[in-house]
Image (tube, rainbow, N blue to C red):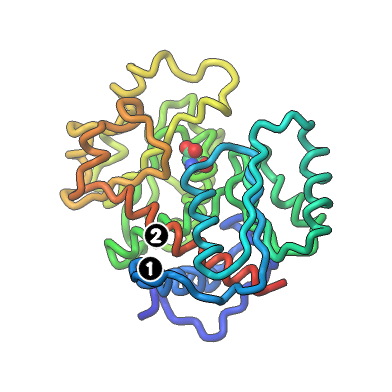
Amino acid sequence: MAVIKKFKAVKISQNHLLGIQDLSFSEISHILDEAKTFIKLNRSSSKKTDVLRGKTQINLFFEPSTRTQSSFELAGKRLGADVMSMNIVNSAIKKGETLIDTAMTLNAMHPDVIVVRHQDSGAPNLLSQKVNCSVINAGDGRREHPTQALLDALTIINRKGKVEGLKIAICGDILHSRVARSNIYLMNMLGAEINVVAPKTLLPHSVERLGVNVFTDMKRGLDNCDIIMMLRLQNERMQGSFLPSAREYYEYFGLTPDKMVMAKKNALIMHPGPMNRGVEIDTNLADDINKSVIREQVELGVAVRMACLKIYCKKT
Ligand code: ASP
């Protein structure tokens, strides 16, 4: 069964997956449909296919990552690709130079796809202009994290049947979050109503232009919502002080049972991870198997990345 709608012979127009903003509705539908076929495979005892046999995937993570990097690595291996993960987080080489030099070096080894995470917004776009293979963005600065938004959509569809018509609250550090940006683009395109909830200091200028309702009062922002997406405070992207204290932040913007009651009874809690328990989310709510789908997000993340690798790797 199709996840959204069945589109015949969908063509992905780009060679690279750089952001949700570059995708059409039918391309998103195609990726999610493809991902759905991998959920079953990943739950079976034999998880391997040979769709990407003979292909080479390089993971290039300039920022720390647990979920995304391991998820892309497993995804490539389950598709039969040769996967190499370079860990360059602590490299002392200069930015900019590093990226282009590294790109040219790797390009000479004939990879079929490079999965890149970088602290600078736009770095994957730059890389895509320098290499002959496909580039998949695994998170760039505060700009986009397309596979995170796609796996979030798949998780919602898996639980609620659709995204269209749902009310989704995205709460926390919207200003520095690429997850928030990609999800705002994607969920809007899929027909959800979006509330963003944050202190004024953590809201981007004119954020309402992205097609969202803006709240600085969490209880009002959660009112009647179907989905609550919590975000981590991106301290590594903050220069200066954005908040009085973590304790006060938790008091006003942490997801706690007294705020959760404002949402619908069957509302789901999501978080891209890593979580800071007691800062943006109550620890019991994070682990509540009747409300939290945080582990399911991780599970479906592998399926989404398999779909993206299959689609984009095949294009080169
Ligand atoms: N893992 C997500 C990201 O890379 C969210 C986070 O780090 O808070 O953007």
Find numbered disc 2 in the image and state the secondary structure of the residue it sits on.
Answer: helix
- Judge left or right: residue 185 versus residue 42: right
Judging depth in this view, the residue of 184 and 106 nearest the camera is 106
| Label drawn at residue 162 | none
| Residue 208 in sight | no
Residue 34 image position (x, y, % from top left): 47, 73
Judging depth in this view, the residue of 14 and 107 nearest the camera is 107
Residue 63 image position (x, y, % from top left): 60, 38
Q: Amino acid at mark 2?
A: Leu
Q: Are marks 1 and 2 in contact (CB under 8 Å)?
A: yes
- Identify the residue at horizontal 32%, vertical 30% (top origin): 277
- Tell me which numbered mark, 1 or 2, is placed earlier along the sequence: 1
- Identify the residue at horizontal 60%, vertical 55% (top origin): 19
**Residue 284: quarter of image:** top left
Name the residue that disc number 2 marks: 300
Circle 1 Cα neighbour tier, 10 Å, few/some/many (<14 / 14–19 / ≥20): some
